[in-house]
Image (cartoon, rainbow, N blue to C red):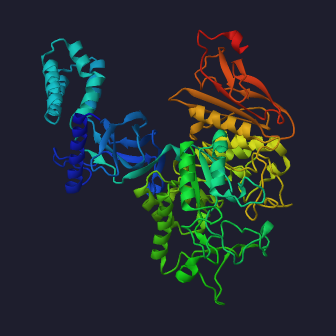
Amino acid sequence: MKGQDKNRWQLRGVQMRNFQTQFGNDYHPHHPVLNAQGRVVIESITPQIDCGRFPVKRVAGEELTVQADVFCDGHDEVAALLLFRSHQDEHWQERLMQRLGEDRWQASVPLPSPGTYHYTVAGWVNYFRTWQKALHKKHQAGQDVAVELSIGVERLRQAARFAASENAIRLDLLAEALEEEKDLTRAVALALDPKLADFIDEHADRPFLTRYTEEFSVTVDRKKALFSSWYEVFPRSCASQPGKHGSLQDVERLLPEIAQMGFDVLYLPPIHPIGTSKRKGRNNATQAQPSDPGSPWAIGSHEGGHKAVHPELGTLDDFRSLVQKGSDLGIELALDLAFQCSPDHPYLTEHPDWFHWRPDGSVQHAENPPKKYEDIIPFYFETPSWRELWEELRSVVFFWIEQGVRIFRVDNPHTKAFPFWEWLIGEVKTVCPEAIFLAEAFTRPKVMYRLAKLGFDQSYSYFTWRNSKQELTDYLSELLQTEVCQHLRPNFWPNTPDILPEPLQYGGRPAFMIRLALAATLSSSYGIYGPVYELCVGDAIPGTEEYRHAEKYEIKEWDRNAPGNLKGFIAALNRVRRENEALQANSNLRFYHCDNENIIFFGKSSVKSGNIVLVAVNLDPFHPQTGMLQIPVAEFGIKSGHPYPVHDLLTGERFIWQGEFNRITLDPLAAPARIFRTRSRLHKEVDFDYYL
């Protein structure tokens, strides 16, 4: 920002603060309070969440576009102003808003860096544009406009009195030119020049400026909060030798393979010591054998709690080394934040008041009838010692931030107090604005939305159970085309250690490819639980969505290069995501028509880069499906009847398509999904033989 412009914006900010403090929102310091006070009405400001109670979400590099209804009584013109400032800045910056029609106004501001910003809208009676409108009407009607031109001269001189020095000189010169111009036609043309009104709006006085009474906020996160590819792995199953307990060093050895598949977030389930009391055995058996390792979510033993590393996994130095080696390969480490304890956690003896004790003297364990989790003790957030509990849990987050962690996957946040999360995330982001929190909350929609409003940057979703074309279309429309998109960023997971959905149980390798392609292209953030996903493991306990011999309760040995693995397909999908800006956002998703209900067809495009991506997926894992795709050629700026190039980004094939309708066949055994990149026209130098 130029120094002169910055000073002018600061001056405006000082003026606005002064008149708001002394006289309220409708007073302007250079004018007496007359009947014009309060004439301007400002309504229906968007975006806003719950009347401004919560901030909307954006990522650095995006713009915030604000709209509002701004109007006044009578026939006077108004002007509107977007006021915008960072959380640290006392001075408002200004953006003149443009009229969209029907008293609706709009302006956009860039969001260059993470942080919290505030915005609101102001408006004023625009007497100069009102005068221009009256002059134009009278001149068009053939009336004498000499008096109106004299009024215009006075308005220009009045504007000059409140403008900065060099702008005041220009306005005085314009007033003098208008006054001395003898040719009526030229005088009217000078007076009605749209650039003149724009200049006065920008640099001159704003009489009876009215500011909206409320301020709104936008939280700006780093780009990874919107665009990320997650890979979950159990470190204890990563040993290089059979029969051994895996370690963090073993995970470090796997980093190049994970990077080669294209993932940029490696998520580890809890890495802390595991309790022995009430430990669960294989397949969630209530009696564990001596060799059973227990669930990583049963945190805490005599070896330590939430700030310790399980001894068989390694040391804090090993953890820090893993963080650094991952960073060298472009992979960030995400740590599971599970605020719960095993019965052996030191907290139970040191702070018994943090837990709920039953009348028989036993401590309340976690349960979701008919399921019981005797090995897990939840915190009691209604404890009278809640302040001490909150502060200790905050210290856990900051401890791992000190070890290099910036991403946290939060286990079951909906079972903890809402105010706690708003406080904790706010506290963390004040110190570490680059922190990212993913809410693992497969719960009721309104609860999921509330968690997102409270500050969670990403959220698990119902994608896991949306399979048909209609289900996917309806659900994505709800997430991305309603107010929900202003605060919730979905992260699509086709599977988790807790969930093996039915399509993956019976659909075989094609089903794994289909769900992966959908997750990676419908959402800008997605994740898989591996290596069971790339190995297409679909063995479930009958009648459930639980893995048989679940890794949650035992150490597994995986052949990561087993025949039929999906590592190549995964790497191709992640490469396509990285190379195409259109797939790195959510709000640009559009569904398009295909006449076959087993084929879903959608697209994403980037206005900034001109990147256009179209995706067609066969939802039937058993049979080839053929359908007619309707390409939105007009939306993409493709002239009717003109050819346009199409490049399949997964297979490398190239085509020339023409017109709206093109037929496609998708074989689930070979290529259940096609991802096409196109552009609006063929360049003259394109060799048609190359495409044909």
Q: Is residue 160 left or right of residue 69?
A: left
Q: Is residue 228 left or right of residue 663?
A: left
- Extreme residue toward the bottom, this view: 360
- Residue 119 on image: x %, y %: 37, 47
In the picture, which quadrant includes the C terminus? top right
- Residue 461 on image: x %, y %: 65, 53
Q: Is residue 122 above or below residue 502?
A: above
User: Toward which corner of the image does residue 173 lie, by quadrant?
Assistant: top left
Q: 195 or 225: nearer the eye? A: 225
Q: Residue at x 63, y 86 (%)?
A: 358
Q: Is residue 6 above or below residue 543?
A: above
Q: Residue at x 41, y 43 (%)?
A: 113
Q: Is residue 408 visible?
A: no
- Residue 385 on image: x %, y %: 48, 79
Q: Is residue 214 left or right of residue 505?
A: left
Q: Residue at x 66, y 59 (%)?
A: 442
Q: 459 or 162: nearer the eye? A: 459
Q: Residue at x 12, y 16 (%)?
A: 180
Q: Is residue 105 visible?
A: yes
In the picture, which quadrant includes the N terminus? top left
- Residue 269 on image: x %, y %: 64, 59
User: Toward which corner of the image does residue 500 lie, by quadrant?
Assistant: bottom right
Q: 590 or 624: nearer the eye? A: 624
Q: Is residue 683 left or right of residue 98?
A: right
